[in-house]
Image (tube, grey):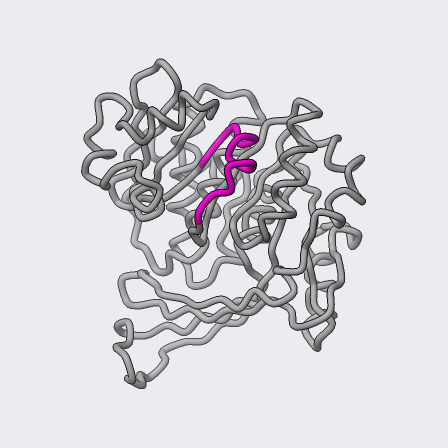
Amino acid sequence: MRLFVVGSFVIACSVKVARLPQAGESLDGLAFLAEPGGKGFNLALAAHQLGVGVDGLFAVGTDVFSPMVRATFARVGFAEDMLVPHAGSTGAGVAFVDAAGENCLAVCLGANLALGAEDVRAVAARLERADLVAATFESPDASIRAAFALARQAGIPTLLNPSPMRPIDPAILADTAILVVNAVEAADLGLGTPDAIADATEATPGIAALLSGGLGLLIVTLGERGAVAFRPGLPPLRQPAFAVAAVDTVGAGDAFTAGLIAGLLAGEPLDAILRQAAACGALTTCQFGAFEAFPTAQVLAAFLRDADM
């Protein structure tokens, strides 16, 4: 099982607060954490934790954070040639996390925005050895477009998580086999309201249009309401959320997608894949920060065994 990620890397700073701030308000921070992050890196690391072989491309700046990024890749066992240096700052972000684990955040993508089609084409041989190619919208369209076009030519399935949301380039969408969005992103794409999607007995008009256009699988995550999968010609498949004491929801969506990818690459039935993905997302919320929170395959298996008892 091998995954290629068109990735992003961010120095992720999190501040735990009693409640999320209002405009112009200063709050006392209850805890602070700075760790490696970014949606692309989180996805790659979470999949790696589950036993998936990972390759990819991640842009790193030429600032004081560059050595930290390289040390992080060495620590987790990622090859250094996954890093592409670009002038400017390494990506960085700040999140506020409240007592219920909900968050708001801002990210400055920095060097991530410089990752280009030429960077992808330079490693085409590596990409073509993958079993699945994935990307999030913390990477520029040009790099995703190039990677997905190469994947399609090689017969490799592609997965897109268009977060943070922006309009999806039609060329990227045409080469996307699997689309993973949350409820807000689904509404932005015109796929339906959270209620309409959660209660759907068949694809909404927006979802039906996507599926008829060539998309093979659409997953909509709905937070505490679980997730729903839509496929051409089949009824929706639902997965309830696991009840856990959430501490921090940062990275939960990336963990869900990683669990989905691991299940798909293992050839498991979709119902089992969704259950695994939901468990990965739930487990990641159980501690402050994301880097140390992504479950291993062993932790995931034990959690699912306990859930069956």
From this view, report whether residue 31 is shown above or below residue 158: below
Which one is in front, 12 or 284?
A: 12
From this view, report whether residue 38 is shown above or below residue 180: below
Q: Give left or right: position of 272 versus 192.
A: right
From this view, report whether residue 257 is shown above or below residue 33: above
Residue visible at 65% across and 33% down in the picture = 149
Quarter of the image for residue 47 reads top right
Quarter of the image for residue 251 reads bottom left
Quarter of the image for residue 131 reads top right
> Percent from the top left, x then y, of residue 248?
37, 60
Q: Give left or right: position of 256 versus 56.
A: left
Q: Give left or right: position of 307 versus 160.
A: left
Which one is in front, 290 or 134?
A: 134
Q: Give left or right: position of 176 versus 202.
A: right
> Percent from the top left, x then y, of residue 199?
19, 30
> Percent from the top left, x then y, of residue 244?
30, 48
Image quarter where the N terminus lies is: top right
Number of numbered labels in the structure image: 0
Residue visible at 69% across and 25% down in the picture = 153
Residue visible at 35% across and 67% down in the picture = 97
Q: Start and end of the magenta stretch?
A: 167-179
Q: Is residue 174 magenta?
A: yes
Image quarter where the C terminus lies is: top left
Identity of the residue furthest to the top in this view: 233
Q: Is residue 132 magenta?
A: no
Residue visible at 57% across and 51% down in the picture = 40
Which one is in front, 36 or 31?
A: 36
